[in-house]
Amino acid sequence: MKIQLDTTSEKTWCPGCPNHMILASVKQTITELIESKTYKQTDFAITTDIGCHAKIFDYINLSGIYCLHGRALPTAIGIKLGNPSLKVLSFVGDGGMYSEGMAHFIHAFKHNANMTLILHDNQSFSLTTGQPSPTTQQGYISKASPLGTADRPFNPIKLALAANATFVARTSAKDMKHMSEIFTKAIEHNGFSFVEIIQDCLIFNAEANNKDSLMYKIKDNKSLEQAEKLAREFDYNSKSGKIPIGVIYQSAERSLEDKWPQLKKQLNLKSNITKKPSILDKLIPTK
């Protein structure tokens, strides 16, 4: 079956924006998974938040829902509850996820639904002209913070580990090969997988850009103690710390689908979201 992930929508990201590379890596990952005969294109669904990143919804030919700000993650979990057979990817930004969506972020690790969260982190609300986000470094001056951002930024990797994450990874938007490798590992993980993408914004918070020289690749890690050490190496507040990229932590725990007998039953039936509910079968004749 022919794989058609492209759409006819005009790409309106800034020329040279790393989102173009993220999109290409996501398409490459899904294409390879389909070509491996492991999945079909209809096995995937996506949700997106509001922000520059969210335009990926228009540029990739997958079913899904374009969500309210901060609500892409609970919507994705809802899709999993409706059809646990789907491989759901939720695309969010550091603004929406770590502000309005923070409660959803924490509880997603607790529920451990078998899905993937892909977070674009450029340390600002770039779509709405560069207001500071929860990961913005101190001192950043913007229209919304003319005196400079006074608050210390969150460390989402430390927060994820404290929330009992079973898969935490970080990658760089400038490394397409590494992104694809991490996306594949995240999708194939049985449980909730969280991937943070360190991403530059060409227009806003430029002082947070160009951290490539601080990044170094790590081997897949299954030690929580080591993961906590890795999480402390970069605090999002300066460009002096090291930034580990790769699988920071992975553990084997029961997923949401394993915990709920109703979902396990649906998985055993290999439910298909394209099948009409049985109540309609008698009313709408099939061709």
Image: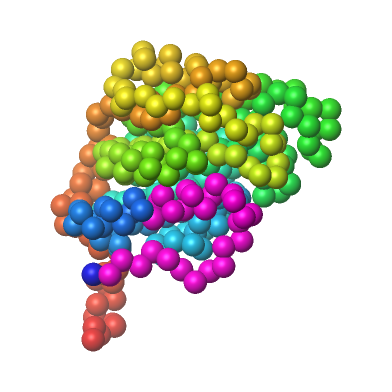
Magenta-colored span:
2-27
- Magenta: predominant secondary structure element? loop
- Is residue 52 rendered to the left or right of residue 167? right
Give residue 4's position: percent from left, percent from top: 35, 67
Image-quadrant location for residue 171:
top left
Q: Tell me the residue at 28%/70% (across/down).
A: 2
Observer-nearest of 50 and 12: 12
Q: Can see residue 84?
A: yes
Q: Can see residue 108?
A: no
- Is residue 7 rendered to the left or right of residue 33? right
Q: Tell me the residue at 44%/53% (across/down).
A: 24
Q: Tell me the residue at 31%/26% (across/down).
A: 220
Give residue 254's position: percent from left, percent from top: 25, 33
Q: Is residue 206 above or below residue 272?
A: above
Q: In this view, does 157 lie above or below 15?
A: above
> Magenta stretch: residue 15 in it?
yes
Image-quadrant location for residue 15:
bottom right
Q: Tell me the residue at 43%/18% (across/down).
A: 230
Observer-nearest of 80 and 225: 225
Give residue 61's position: percent from left, percent from top: 41, 65
> Magenta stretch: residue 277 in it?
no
Observer-nearest of 252 and 180: 180
| Image quadrant containing the N terminus | bottom left
